[in-house]
Amino acid sequence: MMVSGQADAKILVVDDERDNLLVIAEQLRGAGYRAVTTVFDPFEALTLLAANHFDLLLLDIMMPGLDGFGVMARMQQMGAEKQCPVLVLTARMDEKTRLRALREGARDFLSKPFLEEELLCRVGNLLAMHLAQSHLATLNHSLEAAVQERTLQLEERNRQLAQSQLEVLERLGRAAEFRDNETGLHLVRMSRYAERLGQALGLDEPTTTLLLHCAPMHDIGKVGIPDAILLKPGPLDAGEWGVMRRHPEIGANILAHSRSTWLETSRVIALSHHERWDGMGYPQGWHGEQIPLFGRLVAVADCFDALTSARPYKPAWPVARVVKTIQEESGTHFEPRLVEAFVAILPDLLAIKAQHSDGENG
Ligand code: C2E
Ligand code: SIN
Ligand code: SIN
Ligand code: FE
Ligand code: FE
């Protein structure tokens, strides 16, 4: 009847009657249990319980000084790892005592006097249950550890993936800007302008960070524009302008059909950054809030940097003229609310500009 592992189960027997203790210990040892501890003083029992792990406690109820209920109550205060199943030994087996013992932590009862066979049966059952539970708990624990380890690995992998995506995005943006803007500082500045403008609008941190990382993609479609047009020192003729105006759609096509939030956000920005509030922009001719917010916002940031910088086709303008132009275009080119925010944070934008100046524009 003894299940494997039971022979080494640690059993503590607590009974103030020494004769009882001796009989129980002898019967348990006779049945093959090798780790039986007996104690007649309930306080000593508590000391043992606090310091050791037991798999089963055989506990007398009526004891002087501290009864079995008191022992169970203090045991329960010891913390989960000190808990073990309790088999209550008692002569007084009225309904009330029985219920109270169950309520207060007993698993099973044995009424004194008891038959040896009944003792061994109940002990065997409780131990089998307890050992199975412990085994299960250990399994669960290692399973949890394995899952946690795997989760950490996946998180690290995702982080690396996100990092390399970000890097690819950055390089893609640079590739586009490289030909008409060799230092790449236009992208750094305009994306920081866009981020700052987003903050001024009250967008939350994840949103402004998304904006910061996606805004540099706005002109990715310029990779499809020939050098003869892109780098032309003077104004474009109608045919050249027709080609140039295709860069938002070229960019959107490059970025299309991705499950990545970053690429999708970049696509929306590339497509909509030359729309105008009054509907006179390109390629869709959207107006007002038809234009995605990021597109409206990047339009302001992009133009502010384009106007304050030298381009192959134009010199850098003085800041005062740039601000005046952007204000004049409030309600036509730009959303008025954005122009107001732009003016309010102008000192911050100028600080960003000074910090990332390539010397082309003083
Ligand atoms: P970009 O140089 O990055 O300029 C972005 C936007 O800044 C322009 O979009 C425009 O809204 C604004 N911007 C730039 N320069 C001026 C300016 O002198 N006056 C005014 N009012 N706004 C200005 P836009 O006009 O749709 O142009 C898109 C892109 O087309 C420009 O990007 C640039 O690469 C090219 N482009 C525009 N005009 C010319 C040009 O006259 N010659 C050449 N070679 N390229 C041009
Ligand atoms: C424990 O889970 O170790 C205490 C309860 C029991 O096993 O019966
Ligand atoms: C990713 O996990 O795909 C990167 C972040 C994002 O695109 O949302
Ligand atoms: Fe553009
Ligand atoms: Fe640009």
Image (spheres, rainbow, N blue to C red):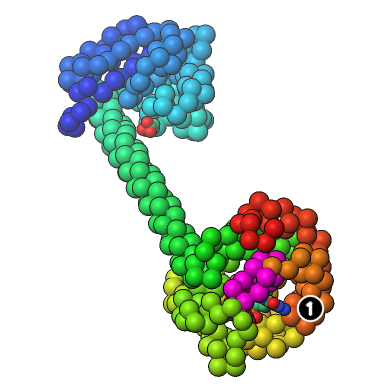
Residue 280 is left or right of residue 234, and the answer is right
In the image, 286: left or right of 108?
right
Q: Is residue 198 above or below residue 286?
A: above
Please name whichever residue, 227 or 27, is drawn nearer the observer in this view of the structure.
227
Q: Residue 136 is drawn in which quadrant?
A: top left
Q: Secondary structure at mark 1?
A: loop
Compared across the picture, whether 322 is left or right of 120 comes to right
Which residue shows up at 32% across the image and 43% down it? 146
Q: Is residue 335 above or below residue 355?
A: below
Q: Quadrant of the N terminus?
A: top left
Dividing the picture into quarters, in which one does residue 271 lie?
Answer: bottom right
Residue at position x 38%, y 27% in the image? 84
For this rendering, which residue is in front, 142 or 41? 142
Residue 105 at x, y percent in the picture: 46, 30
Q: Which residue is mark 1?
A: 329
> Which contiguous range is marked in magenta?
301-315
Q: Is residue 305 magenta?
A: yes
